[in-house]
Amino acid sequence: MRIAVEGCMHGDLDNVYSTILYLEKVENTKIDLLICCGDFQAVRNEKDLESLNVPRKYKSMNSFWKYYSGQEVAPIPTIFIGGNHEASNYLWELYYGGWAAPNIYFLGFAGVVRFGGVRIGGLSGIYNARHYHLGHYERPPYNESDIRSVYHVREYDVHKLMQLEEPIDIFLSHDWPVGIADYGNWKELIQRKPFFEKEIRDRSLGSKAAADLLEKLKPPYWFSAHLHCKFSALVQHGEDGPITKFVALDKCLPGRKFLQVVEIESEPGPYTIQYDEEWLAITRKFNSVLPLTKRSANFGGPQLDIKECRQWIKSRLQTRGANPFEFVRTVPSYNPSQAVSDGSLSGHHRNPQTEAFLQLLDLPYLIDDTSESRDMTSSPAPLISRGFSDYSEDIPIDDVDEMEEIAEVDEG
């Protein structure tokens, strides 16, 4: 199986797919799957731009809407995770994962699927210690604080991934596992990106949660993005232990290293994206403690037995099959030739895919609960600092235009 891995998409699906089709042609090969490591920007219409945390000058429709509307169809199956520049309102609809467009699958805030026997897991968002132990309290429409925290990784989702016992073949995170630079040529990295040096030396470059998952899961492949550069590392897990090949990739721009093709042993095709039995069992076990306020999850509360969950899921999948539920369009797509009012762009309160998924697992629909999400009196440290270092986590500082934008914010 040949898998193309892409760094930050930034909504530029047209160029990424055309690059892959060109590669297939000149190398006389077939790419079976595209994986994107975040900042996918699944923006369906103008309303979604309100939930996209980027400086105003970067708010544009780009090309995802064409695939959402059906004007274009992804030429190869695509799996993506979320980053820190996303249409967060849409991804929240698909918290557990699902089709963002035909042939384009979102792994969820955390998730595992199978593709032709290859097991692919991922964690969306970026790490921020101030919000890590909180619940998912943010709800659309997002205020100025929530739009900057909704994509911060939460302990609950990491805890679920830490329960995995069966081998993972590929794992995805948007930001790098903290300390990963130690396993590659970090001196060459800081020659290209000198502003990384301090964070590398004080071990603050990257995600502690991702590092914990790397140590636990030990996958053969780990792919990341976020920092807009290519970087490779080899992680040896203990003496004579397994090796993880880590690769971080750039964003899709001419002359940038944003694409890598890897070949993985697999069963013969054709391949389809399918639910993972162990992951569904974990989801069923822990859904009752999904934290939807600023309170952290109570993992000591009453939960289902994992072995019973696994057997129950196995029976359900044998009856129904393991293919995800079909894509459903929930809001009107962007139409460049038609002006629309805000009201006409609002869609279903609940995504039918998520409803069907929860019905499959015999679980209640919880993620639209707003009863306490904004009523909690406790709050984290201020989300926006006038200092340069706090802002750098949300907008990577390797691009001149982005550095100028940060300066404007600091001066404003």
Image (tube, grey):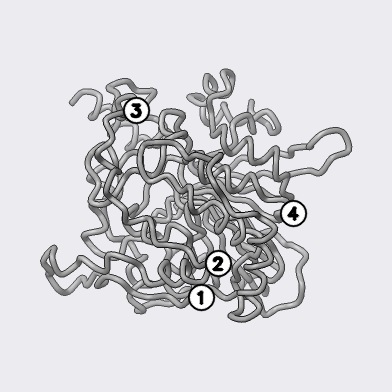
Give yes or no for contact between labels 2 and 3 (Cβ–Cβ under 8 Å).
no
Residue 20 disc label = 2
**Mark nearer the N terminus (4 vs 3):** 4
Identify the image quadrant of residue 404: top left
* Residue on which disc 3 sits: 380
Front in this rendered view, residue 61 or 27:
61
**Mark nearer the N terminus (2 vs 1):** 2
Give yes or no for contact between labels 2 and 1 (Cβ–Cβ under 8 Å).
yes
At x 60% / y 58%, what residue is drawn? 112
Q: Is residue 161 visible?
A: yes
Q: Is residue 34 left or right of residue 398?
A: right
Mark 2: few/some/many CA within 10 Å (<14, 14-19, 20+): some
* Residue on which disc 1 sits: 75
Mark 4: few/some/many CA within 10 Å (<14, 14-19, 20+): few
Q: Quadrant of the C terminus?
A: top left
Give yes or no for contact between labels 1 and 3 (Cβ–Cβ under 8 Å).
no
C-alpha span from label 1 to label 3: 43 Å
Identify the image quadrant of residue 70: bottom left
Residue 252 in percent (x, y) is at 46, 53
**Mark nearer the N terminus (4 vs 2):** 2
